[in-house]
Every structure is written in C-alpha cells, then in structure tokens.
Image: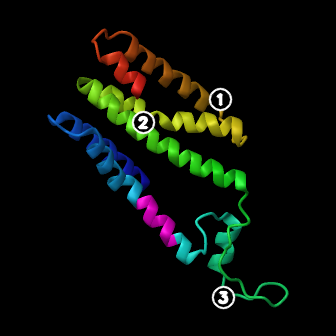
Amino acid sequence: IANIMFGSANFLLSYCNSQPGTSPWGVVGLVWLSSGFWGFLAAIYYKFTMGTIFFNDRDVELYETRHEQLPGGAFYSKADGSSVSVRSKLLTLAGSLFIGWSQVMMQRAFATDPQSTGPLMAVSSSDIMVVGVFCHFVYSERLTFMQAVAIVIVLTGLVIMAAFDSTVGHFLGFVYA
C-alpha cells in the first residue's frame, strides 16, 4: 500500500505541476490527502487495536496471542508503547517530518523544471538510498557490497543527468529534488 500511495503522490505532483495556474500549496494538500492521510488512519487503527502507535515485534507476538494465558497466570492486554525507546519514537517522528519536507521539495522541483519530470522522478525514487545509508550508519543495518556498488552507480547517473543539461531551471529542479 505504501508503494501505491508513494506512486500516486508523485503522479499527482507531476500532473498538478503540468497544469497552468496550479497553487503550490493546493498541490501539497493533494499530496497529503493521497499519502499522509492514510498514515494517519493507520496510526488511529493501531492506537485502537494495539493500544499504541509505537510497538515492536514482541508486542505484535503478544497481541496475536493475547487471549492466551502468559506465564504467571496473567492475560495479555494491549501494548503500552513503553517497549519502544524514546529515541526510536523521536527518530520515527523526525523521519515523518523529513518525508513531508521531501514531498514539498519534490513539488518545487516539478514546478521549477517541468520538462524533466522523468529524471526528477528518478531522483525522488532514489530516496531509498538515503534511507539505506542512514540505517547503515545509525542502526548498524549494514549494506552489502553489491548494495553499496548499486548506490554509487545510481548516484553517478544522477550527477550525470544534472550536470550535462544547461537549461535555466534544470539544475535548480535537481537541487530541489
């Protein structure tokens, strides 16, 4: 579902920016409705079913067996979110803010350089590389050698796309992306 919402948000960004007289903040509102709203609904769902929007794998296992008696005779109830560290919660919230900011910058990129929608989408889709490198250093989720090589190849391609087109808005569009 996340991939479908990401794709629909990027399609809306591209489509709305190709229409004359489109309000930039109207486009951001459409993007939020196409992707952010669903995350908000998921948070509400987890709050009511799991008891919190922050939970780990153990909470999920306990939730799935909540009608079984736990050692000591107690029955499992909903998670309280205390099993997830404050640092993880803050990083999750910061990540959400950065995703929103990246969507606003993507809208600016499309508005600045509408002819480069394809290459700008390539830049937008490469966000996963940033996440992979971030997780490599922050969470010690190590990239394999082939993943690192793939990231270098993609970054090289993006630099080549941005560097060899001298159109006025082209470079600025890539900077926003």
Query: Is residue 173 left or right of 145 when viewed as pictured?
Result: left
Residue 91 colored magenta? no
Residue 25 vs residue 33, the one in the foreground: 25
Of the image marks 2 and 3, the number of the one nearer the N terminus: 3
Identify whether 101 is placed above or below 75: above
Q: Which residues are magenta?
A: 38-45
Report x, y in % for residue 177. Answer: 40, 29
Q: Residue at x 48, y 43 (%)?
A: 99
| Mark 1 or 3: the one toward you | 3
Which numbered disc covers residue 67?
A: 3
Packing grade of label 2 (10 A; few <14, some 14-19, many >=20) is: some
Q: Residue at x 70, y 35 (%)?
A: 137
Query: Is residue 87 left or right of 156 when viewed as pictured?
Result: right
Distance from Cα at disc 1 to Cα at disc 3: 44 Å
Q: Secondary structure at mark 1?
A: helix
Question: What colour scheme does the image use?
Answer: rainbow
Which image quadrant is residue 79 in?
bottom right
Distance from Cα at disc 2 to Cα at disc 3: 42 Å
Query: Is residue 111 left or right of 92 when viewed as pictured?
Result: left
Three-letter code for the amino acid on which mark 2 is drawn: Ser
Give the quarter of the figure containing the N terminus: bottom left
